[in-house]
Image: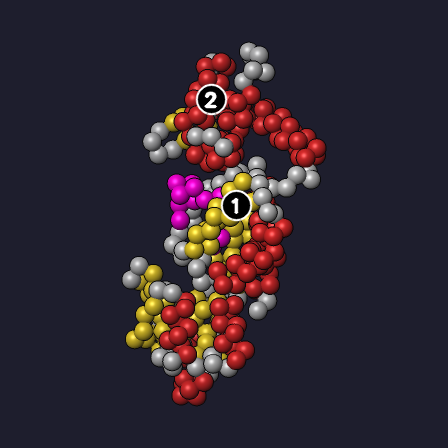
C-alpha cells in the first residue's frame, strides 16, 4: 500500500462520498464542487491502483475493494473528526443553513425558529423555502428538509421528530345536520372537503389500516383551503390536528368523529450528510424535535 499521508483531500472526499451517497452531497459537506470531489477520488484511485467506485450516469456504487478500503480508513477519519470536535466543541455554528418545510406548518414552526433558534446562533444565515412538494434535496441544494408522512426519497438520512395526530373536523351546523359517526362505514357516508394531490383524491386511512375515498363536491390542494371549506359547512375535513387547534379552541370547528382512531403521521427531518452531520444541521434538528413535540401535543 503506498504512503497516503499526502492524500488527505482524496481520503476525505472518498469517505464523505460513501457516507453521503453521491459526489454532490459530499461536495456540499466539504464546501467544494462535485467535479473537485470526483477528481480527488480519481487521484486517490490512481495512487492505490484500484477502482473504489463504479460510476454511471444514474448510480454510484462502491466496489468490493472500495468497501474494504472504506472499512479501514472511515473509522480513522471519524476519529479525527471527533478529536477536532473535542477541541472546538464551544465554537458557534456558522454559514448557510438552507431549509425546506411545508407551507402548512410554517405558521407553527417559524416563530420559534426566528425568535429562539436564530437568536441563539447569530452566525448562521437561514435560507428557508416553504413548499408542500417533495423537493430534490441534493439537486436543489438543501441542507435539510422537513416533511410530514413516510419518507420516499432514496437513501436520505431520516431524523424522526414527532408523530402528529390527525382529526376529522366540521362546522357546528354541519355536525348538527350529519351527526357524529361512530364507525368507518358511517364516516364514509359523510360528504368531505377532500384533499387532492396532482388531481388525485387522497384516501382517508383509519388506525386499523382500512381506507376509503371520501365523497364530496369540494376538492382542495391545501390544508388552508380545507379549513375554510369546513368552516363554511361544505363538508368535513381530515387534517393534522395542529392545523385546526385554534378553530377547535374557539368552536368554529368541532371534532366530528372522536370515537374513531386515526394513525399519526410521522414528521421527519431529512438530509444527505450520512453519519457526518454538520453541527448546524444537528442543532437545527434538535431544535425542531422540541418544536414538533409541542405541535403534536396541541
Q: How is the image coloured?
A: secondary structure
**Where residue 99 sits in the image (x, y, percent)?**
48, 49
How crowded pointer 1 is (Cα within 10 Å; few <14, some 14-19, many 20+) is rated as few
Q: Residue at x 38, y 70 (%)?
A: 225
Q: Is residue 35 left or right of residue 286?
A: left
**Where residue 186 sits in the image (x, y, percent)?**
41, 80
Q: Residue at x 55, y 49 (%)?
A: 159
State the SS at label 1: strand
Query: What residue would you read off at disc 1?
Result: 125
Locate residue 179: give its quadrant: bottom left
**Where residue 35 sits in the image (x, y, percent)?**
40, 27
Q: Residue at x 51, y 35 (%)?
A: 29
State the SS at label 2: helix
Q: Is residue 136 magenta?
A: yes
Q: CA distance from mark 2 to mark 1?
A: 29 Å
Query: What residue would you read off at disc 2?
Result: 40
**Where residue 252 sits in the image (x, y, percent)?**
47, 81
72 above or below 118? above
- Start-end of magenta stretch: 135-147
Badges 2 and 1: C-beta atoms under 8 Å apart?
no
Magenta portion: prevailing SS class: loop
Q: Earlier in the sequence, mark 2 or mark 1?
A: 2
- Nearest the viewer among 244 and 191 is 244
- Nearest the viewer among 148 and 202 is 148
Amino acid at each position: 500500500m503506498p504512503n497516503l499521508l499526502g492524500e488527505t483531500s482524496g481520503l476525505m472526499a472518498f469517505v464523505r462520498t460513501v457516507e453521503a451517497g453521491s459526489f454532490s452531497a459530499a461536495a456540499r459537506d466539504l464546501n467544494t464542487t462535485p467535479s473537485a470531489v470526483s477528481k480527488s477520488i480519481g487521484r486517490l484511485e490512481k495512487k492505490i491502483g484500484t477502482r473504489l467506485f463504479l460510476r454511471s450516469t444514474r448510480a454510484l456504487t462502491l466496489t468490493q475493494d472500495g468497501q474494504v478500503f472504506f472499512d479501514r480508513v472511515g473509522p480513522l477519519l471519524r476519529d479525527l473528526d471527533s478529536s477536532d470536535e473535542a477541541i472546538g466543541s464551544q465554537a458557534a455554528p456558522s454559514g448557510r443553513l438552507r431549509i425546506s418545510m411545508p407551507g402548512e406548518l410554517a405558521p407553527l414552526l417559524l416563530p420559534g425558529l426566528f425568535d429562539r433558534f436564530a437568536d441563539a446562533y447569530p452566525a448562521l444565515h437561514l435560507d428557508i423555502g416553504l413548499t408542500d412538494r417533495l423537493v430534490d434535496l441534493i439537486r436543489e441544494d438543501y441542507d435539510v428538509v422537513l416533511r410530514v408522512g413516510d419518507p420516499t426519497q432514496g437513501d436520505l438520512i431520516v431524523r424522526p421528530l414527532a408523530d402528529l395526530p390527525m382529526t376529522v373536523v366540521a362546522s357546528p351546523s354541519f355536525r348538527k345536520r350529519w351527526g357524529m359517526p361512530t364507525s368507518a362505514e358511517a364516516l364514509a357516508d359523510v360528504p368531505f372537503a377532500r384533499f387532492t394531490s396532482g388531481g388525485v383524491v387522497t384516501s382517508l386511512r383509519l388506525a386499523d389500516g382500512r381506507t376509503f375515498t371520501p365523497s364530496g363536491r369540494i376538492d382542495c390542494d391545501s390544508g388552508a383551503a380545507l379549513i375554510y371549506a369546513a368552516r363554511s359547512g361544505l363538508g368535513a375535513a381530515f387534517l393534522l390536528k395542529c392545523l385546526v387547534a385554534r378553530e377547535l379552541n374557539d368552536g368554529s370547528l368541532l371534532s366530528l368523529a372522536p370515537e374513531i382512531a386515526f394513525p399519526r403521521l410521522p414528521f421527519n427531518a431529512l438530509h444527505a450528510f450520512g453519519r457526518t452531520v454538520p453541527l448546524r444541521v444537528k442543532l437545527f434538528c434538535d431544535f425542531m424535535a422540541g418544536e414538533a413535540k409541542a405541535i403534536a401535543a396541541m
